[in-house]
Amino acid sequence: MHNKIFSFKHILISSFSLLISAVFFNAYAQKEPQYTQYMYNIGSFNPAYVGTVENAELAALYRAQWIDIPGAPRTIRFGTNLPLSNEKMGLGFNIVNDQLGPVTQTYADLSYSYQVNISDETKLSFGIDAGGSFLNVDFSKGTFENPGEPLNNETISNFYPTIGAGTFLYSDQWYLGVSIPNFLTEGIYNDEVATVVEDNLQFNFIGGYVFNLSDGLKFKPAFLINSLKGSPINLNVSTNFLIADVFTAGVSYRVDNAFSGLAGFQISNSMFLGYSYDYNTNTLGEFNSGSHEVILKFYLGKGGNTNAKNTDNKNSKGKPKQIDTPRFF
């Protein structure tokens, strides 16, 4: 009886190891980290966004994916969006640490954007970014079935440069963007790592619209599509409500992957806190208790979060009027 139980347990663990390995290689091929609150994090994957905000922004994000699974992804991101005083250019900086099993990648890049007026209400921004990624694979981490294999004691470290670009078309109420995180897809890894995954161009498509339902209620549907040759398309759709310009609540669906709940609170004019919880709808849902993501944004400068454009931007004394309603993206 004990032998049967042991055999069943061994088969279950072996099958689960194969499942995690498949997920590991798929996630490793998808170089860009995954975000549920992508609508508040556009500057991390589209450099054209960095100059579209009204005031300088600082953002910090932490994502813990697939809780209860050892070696599951953990992502930390810090980023800035800095519009320049000429209202045409912007600068940005991103640093992201992404951990998955024995693999750790740290991305760092600088972004530049330039925007032109398409009409009185519509602008088109172009952006580029340049930086690099530090890759470390430590096979000594974790428990292996054959601990004596030479590979299990190796550590592989490498650095590769990155150059990306994007466009962002927007007005006060809607936006569309497309970006490519890295054009340098050949010769990125050394021979050992290249045997693990072949790199390809990734395309990110994002869009959203803000509906003013009433004075105290706004509704925003949004989407994000990640397309990487050789991998399934990652499609995210979400809906968010902004209540009294303070509370945000919504849901999101990652097709064939997860349902998510989102919540946010405008702590002050200069600070926003967002949270999301993912529940897996695929096989992984049987082995973990979900994923958590927290984002904290700071809006610097007078007036706090004043991303909205306002045609009536001066009061009777000719001074700039503080804008109380956020642009919501």
Image (tube, rainbow, N blue to C red):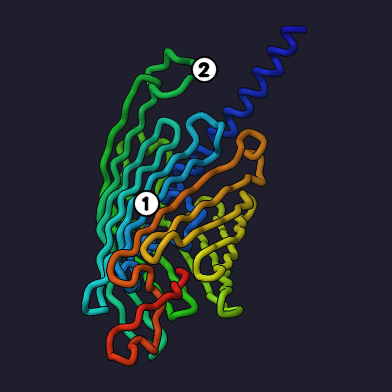
Q: Position of residue 163 (x, y in %)?
A: 28, 58
Q: Position of residue 179 (x, y in %)?
A: 40, 65
- Crowding near pointer 2: few (<14 within 10 Å), some, many (20+)? few
Q: Nearer the viewer, mark 2 or mark 1?
A: 1
- The answer to whether one can see residue 267 in this image is yes
Q: Quadrant of residue 329?
A: bottom left
Say if 299 sits above or below 76 in the image.
below
- Residue at image x 53%, y 75%? 210
Q: Is residue 76 left or right of residue 130?
A: right
Residue type at numbered disc 2: Glu
- Front-most of residues 62 and 69: 62
Residue type at numbered disc 1: Ala
- Crowding near pointer 1: few (<14 within 10 Å), some, many (20+)? some
Which quadrant: the N terminus?
top right
Q: Position of residue 281 (x, y in %)?
A: 67, 46
- Residue at image x 57%, y 28%? 17
- Front-most of residues 136 and 272: 272
Disc marking residue 125: none
Say if 215 sits above or below 81 in the image.
below
Q: Quadrant of residue 242?
A: bottom right
Q: Give SS at disc 1.
A: strand
**Marks 2 and 1, Cα distance to the nearest angstrom?**
38 Å
Query: In this view, which residue lies farthest toward the front?
Result: 317
- Front-most of residues 294 and 290: 294
Query: In this view, which residue lies farthest toward the left?
Result: 85
Q: Give SS at disc 2.
A: loop
Residue matched to label 1: 60
Q: Position of residue 45 (x, y in %)?
A: 39, 59
* Number of marks in the rendered image: 2
Residue matched to label 2: 145
Q: Is residue 257 left or right of residue 165?
A: right
